Amino acid sequence: MELRTLLTFSRIAETGSFSRTAEQLGYSQSAVTMQIKQLESELNTLLFERIGKQVKLTQAGNRLLPYALELLETLQKAEYSVREPETITGQLRIGTSESFVISVLPPVFASLQEVCPLVEISVQTALVPDLFQKLRQNEIDLLFFLDEKIYFPEWVKVLEHPDDIHFVASARSELACQKNISTERLLQEPLYLTEKGISYRYAMEQTLAEKGIELHPFLEIGNTDVITRFLLQNRGISFLPEYVVKDYLDNGELVILDTEYPKVTMWSQLVYHRNKCVTPQMQMFMDSLIHLLGSSIC
């Protein structure tokens, strides 16, 4: 039983595809098929069910998988133990949102650059459902997202961190010093919102819909940095995670509005696929982000 064959086996379990595995590992599809046939012959059992274009683990395959992952992870740890961090190479693929890329992740990336400068980091931003799919298809290694607490059996969750969402405005806004601002008064202001489908916007819309209130934002855009620029110019209000505007709150340019709207808390969550072999660069990213946020590991 060769380790490279176990790697191919575990990668097919991740991706659910012989062709995608071949592409990722740099093999021909026939070579991948041959490796699995040899492994099945050696173990005298069928490891995958091939029904049409779907590839799923058999019961025997499910029993083998945790042992294969344990062996591969032990090998990676052994290799890592004798290498200096700056010699770690390879890719690190992160799926996340633009707001995290702008506001939270820069110090994590900077830390990784100092410790392992040869690692190549790529970031893909999209809506959370699209990122879920990328994680399932092994197109990203780690998923860092903001939503209500979500659990799936195929995930390993390593971080949950609470993030409060607020109505915010310029410190020069006439609403800045008012208390218990009514929703009706709040929505008289020009409203700048992230695009539909974002978790915290959806939660806010549902609360208002219960009161029969429909939103008519002046601007919808996925980039929270653009929204913040309008707020700094005192052009209206927005509903944003505190981490997005923290620096401007700290220096007094923006304020959290005191409203009658109930408190909304979402959760920053970091996950990877349970069939994923954790690489040194993945572990470093996870450790750095956990240290930055001071969050507990689930």
Image (cartoon, rainbow, N blue to C red):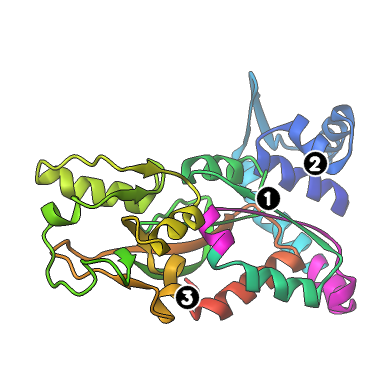
Residue positioned 60% across, 46% down in the render: 135
Nearest to the eye among marks 3 and 2: give it.
3
Q: CA distance from mark 2 to mark 1?
A: 22 Å
Q: Image point 72% across, 47% down: which residue?
A: 10
Mark 2 or mark 1, whichever is nearer to me: 2
Residue corresponding to mark 1: 64
What label does residue 24 carry, if any? 2
Chain-order first, disc 3 or disc 1: 1
Q: Is residue 178 above or below residue 183?
A: below
Q: Residue at x 77, y 38 (%)?
A: 21
Task: Please tell me whether mark 3 sits on a helix, a strand or a loop.
Answer: helix
Q: Which is more toward the observer, 29 or 3?
A: 29
Q: Are marks 3 and 2 in contact (CB under 8 Å)?
A: no
Q: Tag 1: Cα neighbours inside 10 Å, few (<14), some, or many (≥20)?
A: some
Dot 1 amino acid type: Leu
Q: Specify whether 158 is left or right of 6.
A: left
Region in magenta: 76-102
SS at mark 1?
Answer: helix
Question: 291 and 195: which one is in front?
Answer: 195
Label 2 or label 1, whichever comes before in sequence order: 2
Q: Which residue is mark 3?
A: 247
Residue 228: image location, x then y, percent: 44, 60
The answer to which of marks 3 and 2 sits earlier in the sequence is 2
The residue carrying pointer 3 sits among few (fewer than 14), some (14 to 19) or many (20 or more) residues within 10 Å by Cα, namely few
- Point out which mark residue 257 bears: none
Q: What's under tag 2, amino acid-wise?
A: Gln
